Image: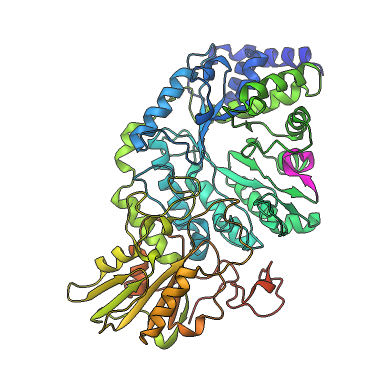
């Protein structure tokens, strides 16, 4: 069927429903599809390809380019928020861009995306929940669904429609810097948690103002890439997953099937390759498997400029990625390099269509999928931020759920002589380690900025503050960053861990404790007092040779803003129920490691918690 025949068929289908023009409510699924087809039939080629582009707001040459190029989507990537990084500032930004989009000939609204991966984590003052590695340790799918639901409310309050979450990767090598974005090394647990997150974000109807669209990522096999040595910081993050299709399906596909069952609206393609073939250009994975075999009806978005590098030629990359099944391209833009700009992308995309390298049927399919989601989100009738939700952002009720998540995610791995819970009658407790009083460190990457940062980066409670708020006024809580212990101390608590990081920068071949942490531990050991060690990290670290010095060891992962949840476990206000969602290796020789592929006994197995 040629393009003329396709459009004639569309017109025949929509003639009976011309009265259903934009502005009226869609009463059922059939009328929704008809409405999409009607709008599609009115669109020019330029309007169609504009819908297929997502630009980071920082790289807009001019805000009016939204109208000039009919842009379908914007995002705020890491560090991409407005100058006024408050919930109100975000709502103002969103509404400003949306007003420009509605000035286009067809008044097609933007859909705006953000990496709200553990709360609305780019925005100051929001509730920051534990990263997924911690949520996996809770084993509580209902909790994950509630967290996603609260996150959706905080995101929706700022106008944003779409989160690039949940990450349903199944990491098989903890040296990967994105390990903490995965719920577990176990595909069944990941599938359960990912499905719960989708249900929490999207609810039962995307028209509900308390919901946002979810995005399952990264398709497919991002957690299975092979570790290699080299200078490239993305040696594993954007590497090659070298397994057969049976293993790909057994390990990495299961969580996507669960997400699709929950009705996930979008899927993000992955940077990695599968057996040497980049996923962004992999028609078998994106179209044959995801869209046709699994029946995915939403749209596929690229990762950040992920369409680049399929070949050595820019135009070939565009043709290959669109033909493979990508529906929306996160360009995302550049103010310095013309070849990376959205203007250049649109020019080359249009040229490729006109010459026949990309068929109009493929373009119409992509735009139909995008428009369908926009109608489902009710963006045509309700395009602006619902500011009545702003008082809920970072509210005490939301923070209480985050605190619940913290205490349920903590895993007690050693508890010699049942030292935990600590007695609230203990007179003198010394807390040590810079991580004990560092909100940014306990939040980790993807918090306010892309890689995260140290210090009081947002509103919250540090672990030290949480301890002091939990104990009685009669108890003395002293603190030092270096572990020098004052005389008369009864018990020591040392908080150690990793500095914040995100993708690429977090890849680590050694997984060692830092020199500062080792010094702090040494100083505490010399005091000769019982010691509880709490680790803040995005994955297991190598602790085998030090563990015998510790009376207790707690993995607190990256708990977010509500540090008092750790004190809840320390002092026995709640039982410690968290279980390892990842195997804790004894040494680096055991990597990559999963519960089904052990060279010898790990330090702690998958599912472990101290008796």
Q: State the residue at coordinates (76%, 29%).
A: 319
Along the line of sight, the residue nearer the viewer: 469 or 25: 469
Q: Where is residue 438? Give x, y as percent.
A: 37, 59
Residue 558 among magenta residues? no
Q: State the residue at coordinates (66%, 50%).
A: 234
Q: Is residue 104 left or right of residue 407?
A: right
Residue 555 visible, this orientation: no
Q: Where is residue 516? Give x, y as percent.
A: 45, 69
Q: Where is residue 47? Give x, y as percent.
A: 62, 16
Q: Specify the segment rendered in magenta.
A: 276-286
Q: From what the image shows, is residue 158 above or below residue 526?
A: above
Give the quarter of the image for residue 351: top right
Residue 176 visible, this orientation: yes
Along the line of sight, the residue nearer the viewer: 382 or 598: 598
Give the quarter of the image for residue 224: bottom right
Secondary structure mostly taken by the magenta-highlighted segment of the chain: helix
Residue lying at the far left of the rendered structure: 474
Q: State the residue at coordinates (31%, 66%).
A: 464
Q: From what the image shows, is residue 45 above or below residue 110?
A: above
Q: State the residue at coordinates (64%, 11%).
A: 15
Residue 283 among magenta residues? yes
Q: Where is residue 474? Give x, y as percent.
A: 17, 76
Give the quarter of the image for residue 590: bottom right
């Amino acid at each position: 069927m040629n393009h003329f025949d396709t459009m004639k068929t569309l017109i025949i289908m929509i003639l009976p429903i011309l009265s259903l023009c934009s502005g009226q409510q869609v009463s059922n699924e059939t009328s929704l599809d008809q409405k999409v087809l009607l709008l599609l039939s009115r669109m020019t080629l330029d309007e169609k390809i504009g819908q297929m582009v997502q630009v980071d707001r920082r790289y807009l040459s001019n805000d009016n380019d939204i109208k000039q190029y009919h842009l379908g989507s914007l995002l705020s990537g890491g560090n991409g928020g407005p100058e006024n990084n408050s919930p109100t500032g975000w709502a103002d930004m969103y509404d400003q861009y949306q007003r420009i989009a509605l000035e286009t000939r067809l008044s097609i609204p933007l859909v705006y995306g953000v990496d709200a991966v553990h709360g609305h984590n780019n925005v100051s003052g929001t509730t920051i929940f534990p990263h997924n590695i911690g949520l996996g340790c809770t084993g509580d799918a209902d909790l994950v669904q509630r967290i996603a639901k609260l996150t959706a409310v905080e995101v929706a309050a700022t106008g944003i429609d779409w989160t690039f979450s949940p990450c349903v990767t199944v990491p098989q090598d903890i040296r990967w810097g994105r390990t903490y974005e995965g719920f577990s090394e176990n595909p069944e647990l990941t599938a359960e948690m990912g499905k719960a997150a989708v249900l929490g974000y999207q609810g039962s109807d995307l028209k509900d103002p308390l919901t946002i669209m979810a995005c399952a990522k990264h398709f497919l096999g991002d957690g299975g890439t092979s570790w290699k040595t080299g200078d490239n910081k993305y040696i594993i993050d954007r590497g090659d997953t070298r397994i057969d299709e049976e293993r790909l399906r057994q390990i990495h596909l299961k969580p996507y099937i669960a997400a699709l069952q929950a009705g996930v609206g979008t899927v993000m393609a992955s940077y990695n390759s599968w057996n040497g073939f980049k996923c962004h250009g992999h028609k078998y994975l994106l179209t044959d498997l995801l869209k046709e075999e699994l029946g995915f009806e939403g749209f596929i978005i690229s990762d950040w400029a992920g369409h680049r590098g399929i070949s050595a030629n820019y135009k070939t990359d565009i043709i290959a990625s669109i033909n493979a099944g990508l529906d929306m391209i996160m360009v995302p833009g550049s103010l310095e390099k013309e070849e990376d700009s959205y203007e250049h992308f649109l020019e080359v995309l249009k040229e490729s269509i006109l010459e026949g390298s990309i068929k109009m049927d493929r373009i119409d399919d992509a735009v139909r999928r995008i428009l369908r989601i926009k109608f489902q989100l009710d963006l045509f009738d309700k395009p602006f931020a619902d500011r009545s939700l702003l008082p809920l952002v970072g509210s005490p009720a939301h923070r209480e759920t985050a605190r619940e998540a913290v205490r349920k995610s903590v895993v007690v791995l050693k508890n010699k002589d049942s030292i935990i819970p600590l007695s609230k009658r203990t007179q003198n407790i010394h807390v040590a380690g810079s991580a004990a009083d560092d909100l940014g460190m306990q939040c980790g990457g993807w918090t306010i900025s892309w890689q995260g940062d140290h210090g009081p980066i947002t509103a919250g409670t540090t672990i030290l503050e949480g301890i002091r708020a939990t104990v009685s006024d009669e108890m003395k809580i002293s603190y030092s960053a270096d572990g020098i212990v004052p005389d008369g101390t009864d018990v020591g608590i040392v908080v150690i861990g990793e500095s914040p990081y995100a993708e690429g920068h977090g890849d680590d071949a050694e997984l060692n404790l830092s020199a500062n942490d080792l010094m702090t531990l040494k100083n505490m050991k010399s005091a000769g007092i019982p010691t509880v060690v709490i680790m803040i990290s995005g994955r297991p670290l190598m602790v085998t040779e030090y563990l015998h010095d510790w009376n207790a060891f707690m993995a607190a992962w990256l708990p977010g803003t509500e540090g008092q949840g750790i004190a809840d476990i320390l002092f026995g206000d709640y039982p410690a129920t968290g279980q390892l969602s990842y195997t804790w290796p004894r040494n680096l020789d055991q990597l990559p490691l999963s519960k089904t592929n052990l060279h010898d006994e790990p330090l702690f197995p998958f599912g472990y918690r101290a008796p």
